[in-house]
Amino acid sequence: MSNPYKIDWNEYAALARQAVAEGCVLLKNDDKALPIRKGERVSVFGRIQFDYYKSGTGSGGAVNTRYVTNILDALKENKDISVNEELEQTYRDWLKDHPFEKGMGWAQEPWCQEEMPVTKELAEQAAAKSDIAVVIIGRTAGEDKDNSAAEGSYLLTAAEHQMLKEVCGAFKRVAVLLNVGNIMDMKWVKEYDPAAVLYVWQGGQEGGAGAADVLTGTVTPCGKLSDTIALDISDYPSTEGFGDPTRVIYKEDIYVGYRYFETFAKDCVLYPFGYGLSYTTFTRTVESFDFDGETVTEKVTVKNTGDVQGKEVVTVFVEAPQGKLGKAVRSLAAFAKTETLQPGESETLTLTFPIANLASYDDSGVTGHRFCYVLESGAYNVYTGGCVRDAKLSGSFEVKEDTVTRTCVQACAPVTKFDRMVNHNNTIAFEPAPQREYDMAARSAAALKPAKPYTGDKGIKLGDVFDGKAELEDFVAQLSDEDLICLMRGEGMNSPKVTAGTAGAFGGVTENLVNFGIPTACCADGPSGIRMDCGTIAFSLPNGTLLACTFNEKLNEELFAMQGKEQRKNRIDTLLGPGLNIHRSPLNGRNFEYFSEDPLLTGKLAAAQLRGMRRFGVTGTIKHFACNNQEFKRTEIDSVLSERALREIYLRAFETAVKEGGAYSVMSTYGGLNGIWTASNFDLLTTILRDEWGF
């Protein structure tokens, strides 16, 4: 039987290439150094021009693909510019004795590759024959392989410093490209002062092509940072304690990313959340601001006032009253992106958000509403703009009295005593985090329904339950203990019962289960494309950080509709992704799989990807539930945090994926959460996920 799911690979590639281009973030562009102009000659420095990192490493990056377009080749395909071939040959000659180092196995790969020494003479020779230099720096990390606050990972190597020094000294126009999965130290920008700096991230097999589109002006950059870039790694409160082999304490509480920096440490920011330059200019005009008591609605007109086409992002942040709970001074409430606007063209965007989304969780009872989400009374100021730093006051509304938006029960609270960060007049203070006050084992036992006695085969098939002809409990009562064990356990990597080379089989993994009408289902890694270890070719997608920087829900949905079709073609029921963990620290090696430091942005884009996949009757498995924010000893460490931080920051994106994306497959982490392993954490998997969210 032929497979009816035909894929237009050119369409797939075009969508991925567009996503790469829209996710590139331009941080600096002095005197319009970019784009490269027609007829100009380019000197490309850095070995990563040949060894492009399509993704990070581990299960989220191990995609066998037909090709990976690197940045050099993509530039050479553009007939309007020329590449310095003498410099290229110099690199090729050097690479013969300095091949790409893959490492010694899983999680043993180096963070970066040895860089060719660039002398002053070489840089000056290239400058004499070129109009602009492009310097490409690359990094990787991944599953079981965190970044390090060291040279060659978060920091530049000595050879990279030398390369930047000589190239920036010889050329008037230098554009530095960062082919990375995650943000890195940026102090060198001030030191060497290149004319342009562009994060191109890890773009999958079309990464080089998308980056070249931005470099040459085919696409005007419109990506925005999904993370805050601080002056130094020590400025992130998560750095202290990162890498502890047994316990990681989230002392910063809800003050993660821009929530911390905008509240307590504005002077420590180099590039704020949402920042990103364009080749053109825009104006944003708030046409209307309406509040109906439950929902805020803004209409914002964006006009292209420059001389080239482009897209622009509008973000809406809220400053809530400090009240008794204390808040961050800014929280993202909504975002939207225009279509491509020609010079002089305008588009009016409608941005809405329910004010219930702004409620804070009271885990201490200070408001009188313990274990509830509370909108504290007072004025709520709304700011609209581009990045968190330039958003201007666009309206406000008042909540006249404390309002409970949702009543919960204490769940997943810590058992380890620690002090958490609080906001005291926009200065840092600490208070003891509320502790768990119940026995989770007793809660779990009380919720356990009595099982129906084993009946043996009564002729009920799973399809009968689906058709409403039988009850699920009666169907399950037919299954023996051995059947139930096999149903729960499934089969691991490379099961012969499903698509070859995939991550596992579940459901009808035995003949007896199949006879009961239970189909055998297939899951495959991962969020950057389908991993099939037998060598089967698949499409390599841009990484999560890049896709977040697009701020484009529609584009994410369309791209993952293609992914869903590819899953269907390969008979894969669920992709083990997207990854929804928050970028708590720039040192988490798996950040490339994840989206952002913000839960709203993360949740909205993950929901869009899930909707795309579901068009073809397949889905994604949202992961890693929850708080997988360190790869080192990830199977052993206990993540310790307050219930408030867990609910407001680390679970919110998962909730959005369930409620707006229709997620129906979830992967837990491999470690502990407040003293209990997540895979057997009743509160996480039942009290919150099922009972509160309706999973």
Image (cartoon, rainbow, N blue to C red):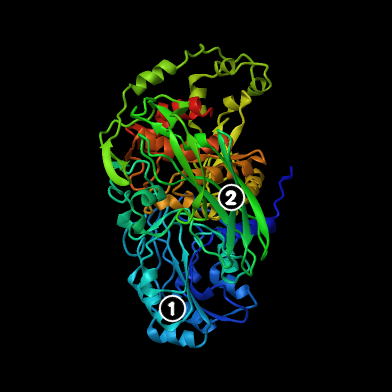
Q: Percent position (x, y) of residue 657?
A: 54, 38
Residue placed under numbered mark 2 in the picture: 336
Q: Secondary structure at mark 1?
A: helix
Circle 1 packing at 10 Å, graded few (<14), some (14-19), many (20+), is: some
Residue 630 visible (yes or no): yes
Inter-mark Cα distance, 2 to 1? 46 Å
For residue 586, which numbered disc appears in the image?
Answer: none
Check the image and report above or below for 112 versus 559.
below
Check the image and report above or below for 183 versus 50.
above
- Report if the CB atoms under discs 2 and 1 are less than 8 Å apart: no
Residue appearing at x 42%, y 53% in the figure:
142
Q: Secondary structure at mark 2?
A: strand
Check the image and report above or below for 397 versus 238.
above
Q: Percent position (x, y) of residue 160?
A: 38, 72
Q: Percent position (x, y) of residue 407?
A: 45, 25
Name the kind of residue labelled 2 in the image. Answer: Ala
Q: Is 484 or 36 nearer to us in this picture?
A: 36
Circle 2 packing at 10 Å, graded few (<14), some (14-19), many (20+), is: some
Instruction: Work out which quarter of the rendered image holds the N terminus and state it.
Output: top right
Question: For residue 154, which quarter of the picture?
Answer: bottom left
Q: Is 529 or 359 nearer to us in this picture?
A: 359
Residue placed under numbered mark 1 in the picture: 94
Name the kind of residue labelled 1 in the image. Answer: Trp
Viewer-side label of 2, 1: 2
Q: Is 118 or 375 nearer to us in this picture?
A: 375
Looking at marks 2 and 1 on the same chain, the residue that comes earlier in the sequence is marked by: 1
Question: For residue 365, which quarter of the picture?
Answer: top left
Residue appearing at x 36%, y 43% in the figure:
634
Q: Is residue 191 left or right of residue 180?
A: left
